[in-house]
Image: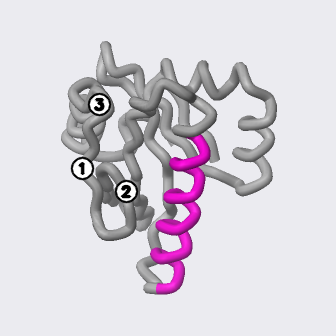
Amino acid sequence: MGSGDFSSQSLVEMTNYLKQTDGLFYRNSLGAEKVISAEKGGEKIAVEVKSFGSPSVLNAFHEALGQYLDYRDALEEAEMNREMYLGISLEAYYQIQDIKFLTRRISKYTMKIIVVDVESNTVQQWIK
């Protein structure tokens, strides 16, 4: 799956949100900062956008993990037929990669992640 697979409007919305939050979060009823839904062909996704505005990447990741799992379970229970993704900035992704404990959590919980370069408004990586 490449960056052109889903609506560029959703991508711009996600990257603009990541640029502007500075730790001020909008939260929906499940605790997500911002959730974007997209569909292309028969594939449907929901993306929980996280800004990692916390000074501690470890704390921010654990909060994101809990919310991601809750939201993924809620989608499954509601039979919404959407794949859950966590949308994070390239900078946050690099910070996570520096902590092996966190990368093992990503694998253990089979987290799907979209890594976005907020400066160029481009998806850098889809992790499935």
Residue drawn at the location 53% of the way across and 49% of the way down: 63
* Mark 3 and mark 2 residues within 8 Å of each other at the beta carbon: no
The residue where tag 2 is placed is 32
Residue drawn at the location 21% of the way across and 39% of the way down: 13
* Mark 1 and mark 2 residues within 8 Å of each other at the beta carbon: no
In the rendered structure, find residue 15 and report the number of the disc placed on it. 3
Mark 1–mark 2 Cα distance, whole angstroms, equals 8 Å
Disc 1 marks which amino acid?
A: Tyr
Mark 3–mark 1 Cα distance, whole angstroms, equals 15 Å
Magenta stretch, residue numbers = 61-77
Q: Could you tell me residue 35's position as x and y percent? A: 32, 55
Task: Identify the secondary structure beneath mark 3.
Answer: helix
First reached walking from the N terminus: tag 1 or tag 2: 1
- In screen coordinates, is 19 left or right of 78? left
First reached walking from the N terminus: tag 3 or tag 2: 3
**Callout 3 crowding tier (Cα within 10 Å): few <14, some 14–19, many ≥20:** many
Q: Nearer the viewer, residue 61 or 81?
A: 61
The residue where tag 1 is placed is 26
Q: Nearer the viewer, residue 49 or 64?
A: 64
First reached walking from the N terminus: tag 3 or tag 1: 3
- In screen coordinates, is 74 left or right of 19? right
- In screen coordinates, is 110 left or right of 42? right
Magenta includes 2? Answer: no
